Amino acid sequence: MFDKKLVMIPGPTPVHSRILNVLSEPTASHVDPDFVMDFKKALENFLKVIRGEKAQAFLVAGGGTLAMEMAVVNTLEPADKLLVISHGYFGKRFVELASRFEIEVEELTCPWGQYIEPEKLTQHLEENKVDAVTVTHVDTSTGVKAPARDYAPIIKESGALFILDGVCATGGCEEDMDGWGIDILLTAPQKAFGVPPGLAVLAASERALAKREKFEPQAYYADFKMWLPIMEDPSSYYSTPAVNEIRAFKEATEIILEEGLDSRFRRHKELSKAFRRGFSELGFSTFTQEKCLAETLSILSYSKGVDDQAFRQGMYKRGVVVAGGLGQTSGNVFRLGHMGNIGHSELVRTLKAASDTLRELGHPVDRNQAVRNALALSTEE
Ligand code: PMP
């Protein structure tokens, strides 16, 4: 009965039956012409999803952290300067990662739940010359969506490379690689694509690839240059590709393109509001500042007297899995993913489980009202 659990954590997210069907197909040879065609299509579709048709896509067995590492090691050499715009746990990860490679790291931070104002970035870049800037589009620890579109011209003006971590954003909210001038957009399949984890997914601009040409990175598996011939011709070999996973990723991109990018982003926005409206009716407040809210997840603070462990266990018992808070928010919030291929039935099931759990814990709430409010909002907007 493993399929009965509804995974509402901020990744992995529920997997659509079309994607599950593809995953269950017999594993093909990695040089089978049919698979090679699917691999090419997956790369092509990914670039459409991120509006990055001028960029070079990479799909490599691994995960989001490998994609972060590939972005950093291929564009920065020891003693280069990196500015990390950090809005939480995953921003911090860039600091640790780059430090391992003796890159000089500066970090811009702000209180959790807020974002760094673009003016602050302008000022920092006027006073400090850096080679690259990393931005976490949506930080999964704080629910903050960075104003990436506003940062883009500021970074461009400074001459630095722009690396965007879209792990918790791509496919759920707008990203425009070519239009915004992003140099590396990295992401992973297990969030808004709705595919099980297993791939590092990224795209690099011409400028990023040119930087790679200027030095030898401290990498073998993570080296862009080793992978480039495979991305150009997937029938050639470097390291065996994750055959089933790549086919599943291709199917996910087909679903996204069939839905249409604008419709998909609108659905995510509406659903995120509906989830927050429903949970606010149940006494939760959103941890993240209003203007920084992401479409893909919510960080919900408990009302007085609701115990984190007891609440999440109660949800689990009812077949709905939510995540605990990370770092400084641990115990005070839970994290709820609402991205990928989900809709109203997941919304209703989650709100029902939360209402029943709260009632069991001695907090009387109106389940029907929460569901009604949530659904009303999502259809009106
Ligand atoms: N960046 C962000 C914003 C993330 O949310 C995550 C994973 N939660 C990662 C990077 C790392 O991805 P992975 O766990 O696949 O290595």
Image (tube, helix red, strand yellow):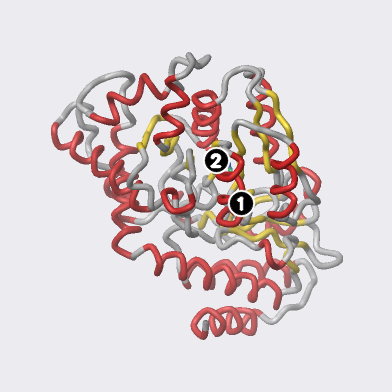
**Image coords of residue 318 (percent x, y):** 59, 61
Q: Nearer the viewer, residue 254 or 117?
A: 117
Residue 41, numbered circle: none
Question: Going by the image, does 14 lie left or right of 46?
Answer: right
Q: Residue furthest left?
A: 33
Q: Residues within 10 Å of mark 2 (few under 14, many from 20)?
A: many
Amino acid of disc 2 = Phe
Where disc 1 sits, the SS reads helix
Question: Going by the image, does 244 lie left or right of 180?
Answer: left
Q: Residues within 10 Å of mark 1 (few under 14, many from 20)?
A: many
**Image coords of residue 303 (percent x, y):** 81, 67
Residue appearing at x 65%, y 63% in the figure = 293
Q: Nearer the viewer, residue 203 or 29?
A: 203
Disc 1 to disc 2: CB gap under 8 Å: yes
Which of the four quarters of the rendered structure image does ligand 1 lie in?
top right
**Image coords of residue 230 (percent x, y):** 28, 26
**Image coords of residue 55 (percent x, y):** 37, 41
Q: Nearer the viewer, residue 161 or 228?
A: 161
Q: Label 2: which residue? A: 162
Residue appearing at x 86%, y 64% in the figure = 305
Does residue 316 appear in the picture of this structure?
no
Residue appearing at x 63%, y 23% in the figure = 80
Does residue 251 appear in the picture of this structure?
yes
Question: Going by the image, does 104 lie left or right of 198?
Answer: right
Place residue 206 in its image quadrant. top left
Q: Is residue 111 above or below residue 69?
A: below
Kindly tell me whether mark 2's CB lies below 8 Å from ligand 1. no
Amino acid of disc 1 = Tyr
Q: Label 1: which residue? A: 151
Question: Going by the image, does 29 lie left or right of 150?
Answer: left
Q: Nearer the viewer, residue 265 or 205?
A: 205
